[in-house]
């Protein structure tokens, strides 16, 4: 029972980070229709940037903030340089551009920061564990969870209540309508990428705080995919639920299945789950089946 | 109408019986029945959104009706997949052409020969012997029976996507004919064609229906009343999921509701005149 | 685009000739020249390094053919093809190392060729397993399932279980002399080269023939318009799975072939990167074109080699570069894909076609 | 090249002795027996491939068809007409008619119903071979008006399933009847052929009169065969050659190549799949010998010029350069000068870089001899082909000499002449300048028209009605039809055709009609080429909706004026076109403005457009047109418009 609760709690906490990144992913898809496979590398960049600032002696929060700004700039640049030209191209082309981007980013990260695991020194969060009832949780997990939740709330509020957020939603729903109320689609695309880049950066930074930072943190970008499949590609609440669900699933699998399938079951479980899930619900949990007209 | 699995009338090729189909809350077909006899041209007319295409999709197997039965040659085929129905001898064309734009005209028509060829992966990959022979046989069939009939000699090696719309429709008909079907479903074969092309297409339909080589039963969905009345042996009038009348062109033309609904609106259907 | 351009005065009196591969003397001459270059000139004059680059190209072609078949001809996007290559490799390796072959078969070099066939079949079946979702799933969701194939197969099953067989640890070493085809022990680039040629030519012929016969047309129909294809009497699910099988089959051949070039195999030889690389190859070469597969393979391998050659001298001045080459390779690959997608989305094959057309239509434009 | 009577022996190089006794069927039988199944007599592109028909098949088909005709009741000298596209069945029908002792009459496939009726009636046609439904319909509608007309034989079953009239019979059925007859009388076919004599009438050929109703010229077997022999003596063909038959069989030139020459040489005759694929099919075959009227070559030139206009800069420049080289070398050849080695080298370069490919596109890669005849060809077109390295030759002849009488010899080509007479042919110029011909190919006379025969055939000399002279090199120069020749204001004679063909060298001009006989100045009526000018206008972003509107636009007038200006160059001032008008439609044979061979019917157009002619010689800038025109699909349209009249710059109007 304890093991179960442990797994659930850790799952929710890690899952909230997944949810944050998944949110960025869904945002890009919703606004510009791009299926982004470079999400993992975007988390890496954000994480390494904040780590660098932190190592330079800047306190954690300002460092994180600086990395957000860098993420913003990079997001806009990426969209302007690479994705802008591809509007209307076939899906495969766009996907492969994001794949290309992911390699480009990864290569650059490796060139700049190397492949060794780095940790935030001094540790940002105390290593003292916290007791929540019978469950023991690392402070890093807890604070990450808190941070992720705060950010999620901020993002959701941003969409619901600010002019820009509403504009982005309008574009996602109907580009022509958005244009008619004076919202530039190009602006929205860029904004979506900028926000996604920032969200990924925060997610990466938080994850880096938990396990230390190396290239494998980019794996997060892949874990996002089962999460969005579960939640439906274009649903913001779906992304949050999906992210947390994947976190839980992963930790449960790690807790209970590892002894039967030693090794990487924790990493593989979300994908196995995804394949099986798709066999039964080929259009995701909240996705819909289109009636094909002839 | 009593549902029975008893052997249906001999010459009825296809029968649909009390078919219901709805999408969500929208009722597309509310209990439609039709009998198509061998050798006839049976037209389905009705305003846009009357459910004509839905009806064709059900006959064809693209949609599964929620209620009702479909019999083909006396056998119930409710659950049969489209490709299996194709093998039984059903072919169709689509309202807006669904040709394979990147392929040449010949390749498009060759695709229609799919069910008549047997070569599999192994013989296909070596190509010598069986496959090569089969390819030549099909080519002969296509050239002698279809290309010649449809007068598309001059475009046989052109990619279909680059052809004008009228020719694409012709190629699509050719592809459907390549199946050597017994029942040919033509979904608005004349839509979007100019006067000359309409004449050609109507001629092809008659040829296919009457010619010794073909003798294909045709199920025709069309807006062009003039052509429909000229070509058809029977006309089925559909209005928002319900049948108004199913009879000979003369009966249909004199039916009060039909007159009110369509024939009065001269200009709606007389766009090409 | 699709029919060959024939010069004036070439005409056919029967269909067999009209369906033939090489219809003019010029093309026949060109192909004979190509074969002479491949079988005589290159082996005679190329040094070991060149041959190894050629082998790399051949391996890439074999790998990319399956990807091309799935993506380019059947419209089923796959991002996990390295898994099937890995299955081929491991099947062949395990068969050679673990299977109690009769001595005669080992001595006469039958074991390895046989293992290639078995590996191909196993890889094909494994591929069908992951193709099963394609019956229901389309587009992006299918991409995800093929990605899952990669992780499940390579990162989980092979790394965690298959690699443990025989207790050798991570890598299976292939002792010299185990890879034997007939009387020849495949132990040099030179011999690998010939094996590569035979296999590449064999697979290309299979692909081309399939594409001009019933099966290939069905695939292309599914790619272009699956509803229309189904109405034509094509069993869409069956043909999709068939495409997965053939793709896996060729992938298996690629994998089983590649062990002849390696001293040891480990899961690191089949990373996700390799799957993506193969997709990149066909995108750069041209989707939906056999030529494209070959052009893309040559282009990518050669570009990377040239990059390496360019960086080597710099490494004397700045030694870290040598270590960083892997990363540079990744970044360059990524950038290349992006640029190609942006500026040459139809790939090299289209360029090639345009150039050919330019001269075919010479001195006019149409 | 050997010339003169002494080199042409009775037995020519194909091993055939042409005696008075030899007929076309006899020659055919001999050839077919000799080649049998080993050689392809003809190919038809059908169902996407070139289906070969061996001499054996040819013979079998003709034999049964001939016997079938006999069973149907064909008697010696009965007329059998044929109408339809070029196809093997057409040739079989003709050959079978000749074998059965009948006389063949060919009709143009696109003839209107009145023309068909006139010829069928006038020629006393008994049987008609019609290709398919369209021809059969035509024939049925006139059947009752032609008393001698008995049966219609069709060969294309398409659309024929509902025809069951008893005067209709399919070619297959006729052959079946022939088979039965053969069973009864196995020797009949041989005997029938042996009965023939060289002086028997073989073909009744209707000339496309530019003025009056068609006249039927009677041609004997001997006429046809000697004609072929003499042409082949000048330019021998090989039995392995390919020839593409796509021009109407009702044109004597096609008969000459398919029957007279084809039979003697035994080359393969190729039939294209259909009219719309003909161009492509010719390219596929790449014939060794071509004979076509100028309009075919003009069309090729036009295609090249239009494509040239659309090509990229580098391609255009290379093309220009190579044509310039080509022109220079061709001119040297025309002047019979030695070509310096550097020019030869440049020519070779031009060939490799541009011309080889260009010839390939046009289907001229393998052409050894190309002939043009039937009308005058403009010198610009002529030079164009020589610059390309195509050995194009002018011929001169008419139906009445079974084809041709005068031809260029290789290496002795002048673009303003038609060359020397073929062997055993004499040419004489009367004092009035009329060209007379005498040879064994001169026809027997006009059918049912003794007056015309008397006028044309005097003492064995054929009076051609063409004006011409013989130049210093002994070349015949054909000026024009005598009745067409102009007298300019300075009293000099002038050929309007010459000026018209010059203008037609411009791709923008489809047809032109020059007026100016005994007038103060020369004017022209121009028909623009709708597709080319339309494209030009599209590029210039000029809006238009119809031919009529396009033709009257100011920019188009500007464009046409430039073209005329070019054509005017090098002409004596009195012969220059001073004013012109763009017509609101193209000339059309269906409107009787052109003959079926696309020659302008001057008298007719002069009458029809007399308003325009009057306006051209008045001070008006406009001419009002109010008329109805008929479109091909039967619709009629009211034309109510003003046509502009434009003066060509640098041309003086008044007599100086």
Image (cartoon, grey):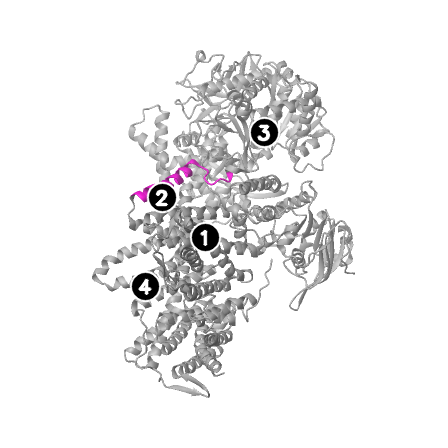
Q: Is residue D50 above or below residue A184?
A: above
Residue C327, label in figure: 4
Q: Position of residue D66 (x, y in %)?
A: 65, 22
**What chain letter is assigned to the residue under label 4?**
C
Query: Which one is earlier in the sequence, the residue at label 4 or at label 2?
Result: 2
**Which quadrant is the N terminus of chain B positioned in?**
bottom right
The crowd level at tag 4 (other Cα within 10 Å; few <14, some 14-19, many 20+) is: many
Single out the mark in the foreground, 4 or 2.
Answer: 2
Q: Give whichever of D45, C78 is nearer the camera.
A: C78
**What chain letter is assigned to the residue under label 2?**
C
Secondary structure mostly seen in magenta is helix
Single out the mark in the foreground, 1 or 2.
Answer: 1
Tell me the residue that label 1 is attached to.
Answer: C250
Tell me the residue that label 2 is attached to.
Answer: C38
Relative to residue C146, is residue D314 drawn left or right?
Answer: left
Q: Position of residue D430 (x, y in %)?
A: 49, 15
- Asked if residue D235 shows in the view, the reply is yes
Q: Give whichever of A79, D28 is nearer the camera.
A: D28
Highlighted magenta segment, given as a residue range: C18-44
Tell me the residue that label 3 is attached to.
Answer: D88
Query: Which one is earlier in the sequence, the residue at label 1 or at label 2?
Result: 2
């Amino acid at each position: 029972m304890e093991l179960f609760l442990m797994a659930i709690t850790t799952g929710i906490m890690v899952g909230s980070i997944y949810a944050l990144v998944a949110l960025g992913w869904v945002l890009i898809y919703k606004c510009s229709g791009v299926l982004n496979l470079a999400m993992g590398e975007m988390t890496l960049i954000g994480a390494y940037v904040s780590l660098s600032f932190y190592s330079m002696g800047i306190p954690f929060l300002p460092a994180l903030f600086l990395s957000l700004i860098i993420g913003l700039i990079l997001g806009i640049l990426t969209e302007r340089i690479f994705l802008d030209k591809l509007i209307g191209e076939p899906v495969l082309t766009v996907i492969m551009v994001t794949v290309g981007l992911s390699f480009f980013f990864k290569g650059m990260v490796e060139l700049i920061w190397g492949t060794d695991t780095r940790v935030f020194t001094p540790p940002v969060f105390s290593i003292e564990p916290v007791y929540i009832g019978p469950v023991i949780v690392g402070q890093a997990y807890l604070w990450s969870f808190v941070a992720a939740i705060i950010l999620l709330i901020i993002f959701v509020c941003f969409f619901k209540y600010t002019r820009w957020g509403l504009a982005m939603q309008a574009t996602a729903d109907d580009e022509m309508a958005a244009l008619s109320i004076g919202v530039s689609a190009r602006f929205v695309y860029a904004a979506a990428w900028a926000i996604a880049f920032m969200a990924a950066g925060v997610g990466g930074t938080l994850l880096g705080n938990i396990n230390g930072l190396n290239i494998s943190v980019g794996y997060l970008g892949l874990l996002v995919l089962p999460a969005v499949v579960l939640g439906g590609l274009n649903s913001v609440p779906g992304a949050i639920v999906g992210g947390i669900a994947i976190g839980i699933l992963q930790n449960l699998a790690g807790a209970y299945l590892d002894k039967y399938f030693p090794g990487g079951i924790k990493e593989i479980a979300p994908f196995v789950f995804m394949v099986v899930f798709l066999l039964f619900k080929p259009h995701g949990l909240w996705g819909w089946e289109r009636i094909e007209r002839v | 109408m009593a549902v029975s699995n008893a052997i249906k009338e001999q010459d009825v090729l296809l029968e649909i019986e009390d078919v219901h189909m709805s999408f969500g809350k929208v009722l597309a077909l509310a209990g439609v029945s039709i009998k198509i006899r061998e050798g006839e041209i049976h037209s389905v007319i009705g305003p846009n959104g009357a459910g004509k295409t839905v009806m064709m999709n059900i006959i064809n197997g693209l949609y599964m009706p929620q209620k009702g039965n479909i019999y083909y040659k006396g056998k119930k085929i409710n659950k049969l997949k489209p490709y299996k129905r194709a093998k039984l001898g059903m072919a169709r064309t689509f309202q807006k052409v669904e040709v394979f734009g990147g392929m040449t005209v010949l390749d498009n028509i060759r695709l229609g020969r799919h069910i008549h060829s047997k070569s599999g992966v192994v013989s296909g990959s070596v190509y010598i012997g069986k496959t090569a022979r089969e390819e030549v046989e099909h080519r002969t069939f296509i050239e002698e029976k279809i290309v010649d009939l449809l007068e598309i000699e001059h475009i046989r090696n052109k990619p279909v996507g680059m052809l004008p719309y009228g020719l694409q429709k012709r190629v699509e008909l050719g592809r459907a004919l390549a199946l050597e079907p017994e029942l040919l479903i033509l979904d608005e074969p004349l839509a979007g064609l100019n006067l000359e092309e309409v004449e050609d297409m109507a001629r092809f339909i008659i040829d296919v229906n009457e010619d010794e080589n073909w003798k294909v039963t045709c199920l025709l969905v069309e807006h062009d009343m003039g052509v429909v009345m000229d070509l058809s042996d029977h006309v089925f009038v559909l209005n928002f999921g319900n049948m108004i009348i199913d009879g000979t062109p003369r009966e249909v033309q004199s039916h009060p509701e039909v007159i009110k609904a369509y024939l009065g609106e001269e200009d709606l259907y007389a766009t090409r005149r | 685009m699709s029919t060959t351009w024939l010069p004036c005065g070439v005409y056919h009196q029967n269909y067999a000739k009209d369906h033939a591969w090489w219809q003019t003397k010029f093309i026949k001459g060109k192909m004979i020249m190509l074969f002479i270059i491949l079988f005589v000139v290159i082996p005679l004059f190329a040094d070991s390094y060149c041959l190894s680059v050629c082998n790399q190209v051949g391996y890439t072609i074999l790998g990319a053919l399956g990807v091309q078949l799935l993506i380019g001809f059947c419209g089923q996007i796959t991002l996990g093809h390295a898994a099937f290559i890995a299955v081929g490799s491991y099947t062949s390796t395990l068969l050679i190392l673990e299977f109690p072959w009769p001595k005669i078969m080992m001595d006469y070099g039958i074991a390895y060729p046989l293992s290639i066939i078995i590996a191909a079949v196993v890889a094909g079946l494994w591929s069908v397993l992951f193709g099963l979702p394609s019956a229901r799933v389309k587009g992006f969701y299918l991409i995800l399932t093929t990605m899952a194939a990669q992780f499940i197969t390579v990162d989980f099953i092979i790394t965690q279980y298959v690699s443990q067989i025989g207790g050798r640890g991570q890598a299976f070493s292939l002792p010299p002399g185990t890879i034997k085809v007939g009387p020849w022990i495949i132990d040099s680039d030179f011999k690998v080269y010939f094996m590569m040629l035979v296999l590449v030519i064999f697979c290309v012929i299979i692909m081309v023939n399939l594409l001009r016969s019933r099966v290939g047309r069905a695939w292309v129909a599914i790619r272009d318009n699956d509803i229309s294809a189904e109405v034509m009497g094509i069993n869409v699910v069956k043909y999709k799975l068939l495409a997965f099988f053939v793709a896996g089959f060729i992938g298996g051949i690629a994998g089983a072939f590649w062990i002849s070039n390696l001293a040891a195999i480990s899961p690191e030889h089949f990373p996700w990167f390799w799957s993506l690389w193969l997709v990149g190859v066909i995108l750069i070469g041209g989707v939906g074109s056999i030529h494209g597969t070959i052009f893309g393979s040559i282009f990518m391998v050669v570009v990377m080699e040239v990059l390496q050659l360019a960086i080597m001298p710099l490494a004397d001045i700045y030694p870290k570069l040598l270590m960083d080459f892997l990363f540079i390779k990744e970044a360059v690959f990524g950038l290349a894909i992006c640029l190609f997608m942006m500026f040459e989305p139809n790939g090299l094959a289209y360029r090639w076609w345009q150039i050919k057309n330019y001269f075919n239509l010479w001195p006019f434009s149409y | 090249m050997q010339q003169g009577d002494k080199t042409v022996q009775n037995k020519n190089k194909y091993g055939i002795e042409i005696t008075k006794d030899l007929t076309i069927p006899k020659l055919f039988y001999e050839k077919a027996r000799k080649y049998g199944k080993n050689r392809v007599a003809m190919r038809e592109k059908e169902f996407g491939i070139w289906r070969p028909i061996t001499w054996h098949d040819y013979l079998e088909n003709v034999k049964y068809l001939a016997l079938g005709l006999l069973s149907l009741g064909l008697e010696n000298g009965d007329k059998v007409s044929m109408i339809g596209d070029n196809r093997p069945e057409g040739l079989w029908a003709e050959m079978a008619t000749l074998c059965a002792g009948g006389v063949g009459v060919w009709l143009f496939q696109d003839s209107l119903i009145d023309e068909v009726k006139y010829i069928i009636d006038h020629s006393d046609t008994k049987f008609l071979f019609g290709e398919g439904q369209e021809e059969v319909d035509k024939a049925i509608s006139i059947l009752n008006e032609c008393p001698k007309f008995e049966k219609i034989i069709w060969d294309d079953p398409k659309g024929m399933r509902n025809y069951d009239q008893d005067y209709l019979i399919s070619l297959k059925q006729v052959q079946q009847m022939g088979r039965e007859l053969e069973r009864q009388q196995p020797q009949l076919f041989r005997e029938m052929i042996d009965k023939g004599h060289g002086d028997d009438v073989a073909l009744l050929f209707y000339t496309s009169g530019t003025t009056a109703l068609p006249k039927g010229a009677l041609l004997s077997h001997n006429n046809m065969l000697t004609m072929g022999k003499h042409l082949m003596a000048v330019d021998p063909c090989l039995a392995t050659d390919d020839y593409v038959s796509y021009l109407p069989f009702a044109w004597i030139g096609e008969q000459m190549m398919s029957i007279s020459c084809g039979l003697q040489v035994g080359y393969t005759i190729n039939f294209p799949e259909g009219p719309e694929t003909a161009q492509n099919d010719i390219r596929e075959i790449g014939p060794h010998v071509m004979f076509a009227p100028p309009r075919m070559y003009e069309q090729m030139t036009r295609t090249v010029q239009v494509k040239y206009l659309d090509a990229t800069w580098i391609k255009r420049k290379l093309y220009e350069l190579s044509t310039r080289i080509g022109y220079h070398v061709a001119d040297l050849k025309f002047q019979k000068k030695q070509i310096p080695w550097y020019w030869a080298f440049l020519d070779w370069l031009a060939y490799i870089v541009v011309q080889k490919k260009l010839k390939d596109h046009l289907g001229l890669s393998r052409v050894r001899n190309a002939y043009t005849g039937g009308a005058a060809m403009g010198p610009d077109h002529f030079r164009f082909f020589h610059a390309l390295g195509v050995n194009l030759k002018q011929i001169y002849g008419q139906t009445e000499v079974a084809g041709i009488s005068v031809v260029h010899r290789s290496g002795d080509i002048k673009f303003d002449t038609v060359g020397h007479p073929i062997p055993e042919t004499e040419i004489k110029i009367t004092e009035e300048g009329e060209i007379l011909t005498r040879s064994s190919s001169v026809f027997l006379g006009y059918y049912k028209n003794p007056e015309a025969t008397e006028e044309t055939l005097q003492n064995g000399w054929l009076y051609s009605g063409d004006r011409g002279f013989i130049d210093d090199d002994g070349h015949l120069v054909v000026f024009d039809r005598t009745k067409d020749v102009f007298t300019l204001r300075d009293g000099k004679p002038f050929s309007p055709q010459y000026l018209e063909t010059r203008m037609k060298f411009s791709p923008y001009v489809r047809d032109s009609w020059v007026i100016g006989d005994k007038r103060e100045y020369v004017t022209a009526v121009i028909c623009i080429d709708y597709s080319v000018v339309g494209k030009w206008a599209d590029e210039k972003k000029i809006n238009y909706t119809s031919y009529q509107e396009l033709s009257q636009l100011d920019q188009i007038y500007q464009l046409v004026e430039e073209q005329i200006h070019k054509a005017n160059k090098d002409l004596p001032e009195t012969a220059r076109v001073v004013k012109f008008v763009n017509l609101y439609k193209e000339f059309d044979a269906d409107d009787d403005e052109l003959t079926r061979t696309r020659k302008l019917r001057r008298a007719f157009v002069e009458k029809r457009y007399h308003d325009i002619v009057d306006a051209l010689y008045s001070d008006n800038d406009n001419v009002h047109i109010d008329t109805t025109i008929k479109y091909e699909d039967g619709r009629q349209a009211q034309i109510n418009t003003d046509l502009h009249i434009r003066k060509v710059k640098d041309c003086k109007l008044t007599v100086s």
